[in-house]
Amino acid sequence: MITSNQFGPKGWTPELLGSLHNKTYVITGANSGAGFEATRILLGKGASVVMLNRNQQKSVAAINTLQQEFGAEAKVKFVHMDLAALDSVRNAATTLLATVSNIDALICNGAIAQVAKQEHTVDGFESQLGVNHFGHFLLCGLLFERIESSQGRIVVVGSNAYKMGKKTIQFDDLNFDHKYTAWDAYAQSKLAQMMFAFELQKRIEKAEKAVKVYVCHPGASRTNLLKDTASTFNKALWAVLSRFIAQSAEKGAWPEVMCATQAGLEPQRIYGPTKRAQTVGPVGECPLDEVVLDETLATKLWSVSEDKTSFTWAF
Ligand SMILES: NC(=O)c1ccc[n+]([C@@H]2O[C@H](COP(=O)([O-])OP(=O)(O)OC[C@H]3O[C@@H](n4cnc5c(N)ncnc54)[C@H](OP(=O)(O)O)[C@@H]3O)[C@@H](O)[C@H]2O)c1
């Protein structure tokens, strides 16, 4: 039971950040929403940021905006990566490893949500599971050694959705061919991402590797998340509801920046806004639903993910 916020009544805020000069952060899906705001906060403290984005035009626009704010010398660039295509993830990792000597944190932020009708990634996975989980699973594996040599971190951006939906990984129907619903498929994908993160923490500890893995969520934040993917009804509903129940995209970025930078965080925890059912409010530790720590599911998910991505971890 969590009795108080370790960062005090205001929770964690970017005011707690010191200089991040000489630090390099890699963020997936950083041209909008929480990923963009995280980039802004990190750049504002002197860090370098590499955005792994799928859309060149939006990325150029995002970099222009950041350069207007921080000057043309702002240390931000983008590498093309589409999480919906494993070959694209492999190419992006190759480019990154050839051009970035240090990764202080990889923030697995990019995602799609509430995809109205069943869709598939290039590799044939249900789109949310493919983009949110399999794409990041492979990326983390390909970048792991560089993160380790930097004594860096992996931050997995989860969602309160992990404890909703079916609260399991449907190994017999991963793609929801039987009865697709946008909500259940999104919830499965976020549960898979978080389950992977907690399993990775355990394996790292056992193998005595020098990488920290932290899990966070942005609560309910006003971003583009449902804009391209959700049903017309869900989009309209969220457009109205979010005005009353959600916080800014910037506040939604705080937990991921915190997990990328703050000392004294713990494994087997989820960090995010702590009020109104963990949707808004001071950032700190949130209650963790045990489903995400299920060892049997996590072990099976790990081996299924290795198989689906054709990537085998060394430990
Ligand atoms: N907003 C919320 O209330 C909320 C709640 C719970 C969890 N989250 C989580 O917060 C994280 C950030 O989302 P957000 O709310 O900031 O939404 P967002 O504004 O839509 O940002 C998501 C980012 O992911 C990128 N992306 C989508 N598909 C991709 C792909 N195939 N390859 C590479 N990048 C891709 C998007 O790029 P494009 O611009 O090209 O689309 C966008 O930059 C996600 O992990 C989400 O699950 C958000």
Image (spheres, rainbow, N blue to C red):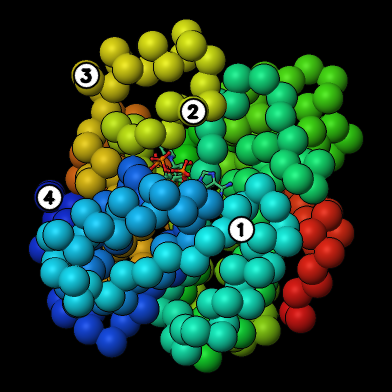
Sooner in the amino-acid sequence: mark 3 or mark 2: 2
Residue bearing the label numbered 4: 10
The x, y position of residue 37, in whole percent, is 27, 52
Residue 74 or residue 148, whichever sits in front: 74
Q: Quadrant of ligand 1?
A: top left
Q: Which mark is residue 244?
A: 3
Q: Which mark is residue 136?
A: 1
Spatial CA distance of label 1 from label 3 is 32 Å
Residue 258 is at least partly visible in this image: yes
In this rendering, the label closer to the viewer, 3 or 2: 2
Mark 3, secondary structure of its residue: helix
Residue 240 picture quarter:
top left
Sooner in the amino-acid sequence: mark 4 or mark 3: 4
Q: Quadrant of the C terminus?
A: bottom right
Tell me if residue 285 comes above or below residue 160 in the rendering: below
Sooner in the amino-acid sequence: mark 1 or mark 4: 4
Task: Answer few, some or many: residues within 10 Å of disc 2's Cα (few below 14, many 20 plus, some between 14 and 19).
Answer: some
Mark 4, secondary structure of its residue: loop
Sooner in the amino-acid sequence: mark 2 or mark 1: 1
Asked if the beta carbon under badge 4 is closer than 8 A to the nearest atom of ligand 1, the reply is no
Sooner in the amino-acid sequence: mark 1 or mark 3: 1
